[in-house]
Image (cartoon, helix red, strand yellow):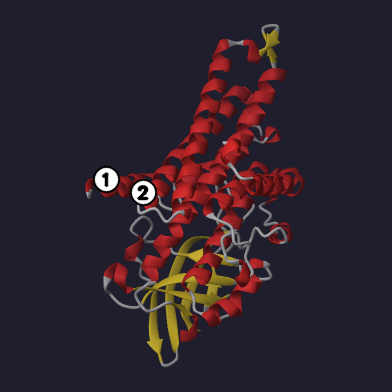
Amino acid sequence: MSALLTDEQTMIQDMARRFADEQLGPHSQRWDAESHFPVETIRAAAELGFAGIYIDEDLGGSGLGRLDAALIFEQLSHGDVSTAAFISIHNMASWMIARFGNDEQRAEWLARLTSMELIASYCLTEPGSGSDAAAMKTRAVREGDDYLLTGSKQFISGAGTSDIYVVMARTSDDGANGVSTFIVEKDRPGLSFGANEAKMGWKSQPTRQVLFDGVRVPARNRIGAEGDGFRFAMAGLDGGRLNIAACSLGGAQLALDKALAYAREREQFGQPIAGFQAIQFKLADMETELQAARVMLYEAARRLDAKDPKATRWCAMAKRFVTDTGFRIANEALQIHGGYGYLSDYGVEQIVRDLRVHQILEGTNEIMRVIVSRDMLKE
């Protein structure tokens, strides 16, 4: 695939890999063990332009495309999956303001978001609405020049630490057409957060409920018109699905690298286990599947950059295929390590734990199949 990249893309890829090797990888296991959110390291990534990857340069961003973003998140995840995934979420929230906000909102927020002076979270999922996102119940009721937000959001990465929250809330009962988008600052009275969830993986980022108890938000903080929010949310998810697939790809590559090194070193029955055909076949399948996933991800990213009418289908296909493949490769890497793979010292079990959630978030892989099949059947 490297032969299909431009010189600039190769440079971007190399820069992200150096940052991952120097700033993420050496600390990944400690952050996981301590559930530490490395805010200063994340802000260091912003100095390289990784906090506004596909935001225009005149708005403070890097002005790159979705393929460039996939290259970056793939490499960052080779250092630490969980931290890279959070940076991708910040990018998605910031992009929604850049893409759908007005000039005043862009001027007020984007310079501080692309520098990560401010950190952003994305609030769509609720306790009672996961895959059925349009069934959300969080309400925004107009009161003069303000809206009063009441309800809750679930599984919000960065919650409690992030400075602003891009929130989808219901402004009418008209199904998906009754959802609007708001920028909510952390210090708004009535905004609070649940306990940090005890999770299987993604431990280097906090995950909490975001609770709204009559939170007063000025109407100027509404992004776009009333009723446009669900469309904005779905547009954001196309890119979000590519980003999370890229994080799976980078984590799976790290797991394969570890498995290959271990197979060369570990001896059983008087020889390295890499000499056994069973291990050789595993490694060959892992490499083949990883490269196939990489091709699909890059193709989907190119289609999104090109505004291909089939981009949403491709993003869903890539998200499903790459995250399923990435988890399977990480699990095989653990198997090659045998009992040692189950120990935290080797870092493989952490990758397995971190990659598992990628098959669930940004739309479950079952929902990805729904998106793909519906698009096929309407032709």
Name the spot of residue 341 as percent of width and height, x first.
63, 29
Name the spot of residue 374 as percent of width and height, x first.
26, 49
> Quick check: 299 above or below 281?
below
* Mark before the other along the chain sequence, 1 or 2: 2
> Quick check: 267 above or below 62?
above
> Quick check: 232 above or below 358?
below
Label 1: which residue?
A: 376
Residue at figure coordinates x 57%, y 52% from the top left: 69
| Quadrant of the image occupied by residue 109 | bottom right
Q: Is residue 361 left or right of residue 173?
A: right
- Residue toward you, 334 or 68: 68
| Quadrant of the image occupied by residue 169 | bottom left
SS at badge 1: helix
- Residue 203 seen in the figure: no
Q: Is residue 284 left or right of residue 117?
A: left
Q: What mark, if any, has residue 313 been given in the picture?
A: 2
- Residue toward you, 299 or 173: 299
Q: Locate the N terminus and report the quarter of the image it occupies.
A: top right
Q: What mark, if any, has residue 53 been given in the picture?
A: none
Q: Is residue 194 left or right of residue 169?
A: right
What is the three-letter code of the residue carrying label 1? Answer: Met
Residue extending furthest bottom? 144
Task: Answer few, some or many: residues within 10 Å of disc 1's Cα (few below 14, many 20 plus, some between 14 and 19).
Answer: few
What is the three-letter code of the residue carrying label 2? Answer: Arg
Tags 1 and 2 in contact by the CB under 8 Å rule? yes
